[in-house]
Amino acid sequence: DCLSNVVSRLSRLSAIFFAAMKGAIVVGTLWISTSAVFSTYANGQFLRRFHDPCAHTFIRFALSCFLGLLCSSLSAQPLGPILPELSRRLLLPSALLLTANLLNSMSMLCSGVTLTYV
């Protein structure tokens, strides 16, 4: 009984891992393609026109969420059952990336140069 419990848990963890990997490939592809289209030049144009790094961060966050929801709705495995667990695990990295994005927008507005891209 203990062995079947372990096997069951490992099976669920591997399913979550493979779903996350599939999602990571989609997100990575979308990130690279949108970075190629909406590069520093486009970000700079947005900031020069609206002069608001918070709006810039919000627009990027909203579009990222929309694309994520769209991709997950088109995927074979729905994210609904595992979304609460993924949200808990990704809360700190998400907050740090959101902060880095805001600081980058502020840097681009003030100097025209990105701050946080590696």
Image (tube, helix red, strand yellow):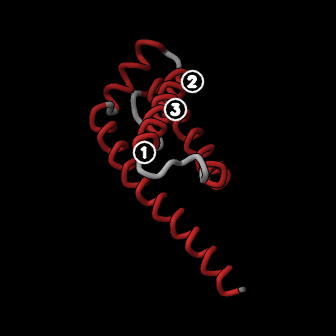
Query: In the rendered image of this protein, does residue 75 appear above or below residue 105?
Result: below
Q: Residue at x 46, y 13 (%)?
A: 50
Label 2 sits on what residue type? Cys
How much space separates mark 3 and mark 2, taking CA atoms? 10 Å
- N-term-proximal mark, 3 vs 2: 2
Q: Is 73 left or right of 81, judged from the image as shown?
A: left
Q: Specify few, some or many for label 1: CA neighbours under 10 Å numbering under 14, 14-19, or 20 or more.
A: few
How much space separates mark 3 and mark 1, taking CA atoms? 16 Å
Q: Residue at x 32, y 33 (%)?
A: 39
Q: Quadrant of the N terminus?
A: bottom right
Q: Residue at x 57, y 39 (%)?
A: 98
Q: Determine the secondary structure under disc 3.
A: helix
Q: Position of residue 42 (x, y in %)?
A: 33, 25
Which numbered disc, 3 or 2, marks the residue closer to the eye?
A: 3
Label 1 sits on what residue type? Tyr
Q: Is 21 left or right of 54, judged from the image as shown?
A: left
Q: Specify few, some or many for label 3: CA neighbours under 10 Å numbering under 14, 14-19, or 20 or more.
A: some
Q: Determine the secondary structure under disc 1.
A: loop
How much space separates mark 1 and mark 2, taking CA atoms? 18 Å
- N-term-proximal mark, 3 vs 1: 3
Query: In the rendered image of this protein, does residue 62 appear above or below residue 75?
Result: above
**47 or 58, nearer to the observer:** 58
Q: Position of residue 41 (x, y in %)?
A: 31, 27
Mark identifier at residue 117: 1
Q: Determine the secondary structure under disc 2.
A: helix
Q: Is 44 left or right of 13, judged from the image as shown?
A: left
Mark 2 lies on residue: 54
Q: Is 29 left or right of 21, judged from the image as shown?
A: left
- Badge 1 vs badge 2, beta-carbon distance below 8 Å: no
Mark identifier at residue 58: none
Mark identifier at residue 61: 3
